[in-house]
Structures are given as C-alpha cells and as structure tokens.
C-alpha cells in the first residue's frame, strides 16, 4: 500500500460549521486538506485509478479536497483528514479481482427448467374454464 507523503498535503484551518456555541464562532478548528494527485509521489497506476474515481471529493483539476470538523481540536481534525485521504488511496491501490466467466452446472440448469415448467403450469391454470357450460 502506498503511503501519503505529509509534505505533499496542504492544510488550511477554517471555521467549523454547525452547533458548538461560542467556541465554533471564535476558533478555526476544522481542517481543510488539499492533495494534488498529479504532482504527488504516488505510483502512476494508483494516480490513474484515483483520478478515474467518480468521487465528489476529487475536483476536475485532480485535487482531492477533504474537510474534517468532527473534533474540537485542530490536530485531531488534521489526523482525521489524513486518515480519510489514506483510506481513499488504499481503496484504489489494490486492483479489483478480474471475474472469470464460468458455465452454469448441469444441476442448476435442470433446477431452472423445472422452476419454469412449474410456473408455466400455474399460469395455464389461470385461463378461462373450458367445457363447463
């Protein structure tokens, strides 16, 4: 798993949103993380998959923007933002397993056909009743 170089991450302290009384209005505790994917030291394959992700946190210019404001501490929010960035990179670091096409077994084919025949009999019984006049 490739790790994020802390020097490539840009942090900005901003005011947090939501309830919190005076503290939230006075102190800039929320961490705003910006990480430029193209200029990073990540492997090229990881960069490509990261930029191909359909994630709202990745801008059209290829910058990952994460805002962390769960804690009252700026340091904890920075750590949380870095953890979320690392999670995002880890999610694309491993290639998804290629699916191998397989054929259905003989037994599963027979069970399917039996189910279809049963269903057909049920539906045949729903028609008008013949010869009872």
Image (cartoon, rainbow, N blue to C red):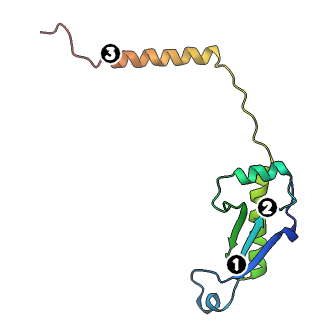
> Which of labels 3 and 2 is toward the front?
2
Label 1: which residue?
71
Q: Secondary structure at mark 2?
A: helix
**Among numbered discs 2 and 1, the one appearing first in the sequence:** 1
**Among numbered discs 3 and 2, the one appearing first in the sequence:** 2
Residue 81 on image: x %, y %: 74, 70
Marks 3 and 2 sit apart, C-alpha to C-alpha, by 59 Å
**Among numbered discs 1 and 3, the one appearing first in the sequence:** 1
* 10 Å crowding of disc 1: few (<14), some (14-19), many (20+): some
Residue 95 or residue 121, whichever sits in front: 95
Residue 20 or residue 122, whichever sits in front: 20
Which residue is at a point 78% across and 60% down the rendered structure image?
37
Label 3: which residue?
124
Residue 55 on image: x %, y %: 65, 57
> Which of labels 1 and 3 is toward the front?
1
The quarter of the picture where the C terminus appears is top left
Marks 2 and 1 sit apart, C-alpha to C-alpha, by 19 Å
Residue 26 on image: x %, y %: 65, 92
Residue lying farthest top?
Answer: 131
Label 2: which residue?
86
> Which of labels 2 and 1 is toward the front?
2
Marks 1 and 3 sit apart, C-alpha to C-alpha, by 65 Å
């Amino acid at each position: 798993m490739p790790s994020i170089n802390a020097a490539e991450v840009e942090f900005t302290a901003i005011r947090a949103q939501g309830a919190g009384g005076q503290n939230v209005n006075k102190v800039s505790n929320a961490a705003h993380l910006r990480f430029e994917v193209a200029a990073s030291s990540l492997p090229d394959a990881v960069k490509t998959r990261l930029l191909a992700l359909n994630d709202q946190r990745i801008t059209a210019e290829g910058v990952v923007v994460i805002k962390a404001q769960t804690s009252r501490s700026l340091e904890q929010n920075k750590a949380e933002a870095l953890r979320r960035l690392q999670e995002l990179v880890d999610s694309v670091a491993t290639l998804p397993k290629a699916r191998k096409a397989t054929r259905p077994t003989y037994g599963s084919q027979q069970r399917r056909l039996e189910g279809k025949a049963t269903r057909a009999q049920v539906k045949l019984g729903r028609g008008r009743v013949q010869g009872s006049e």
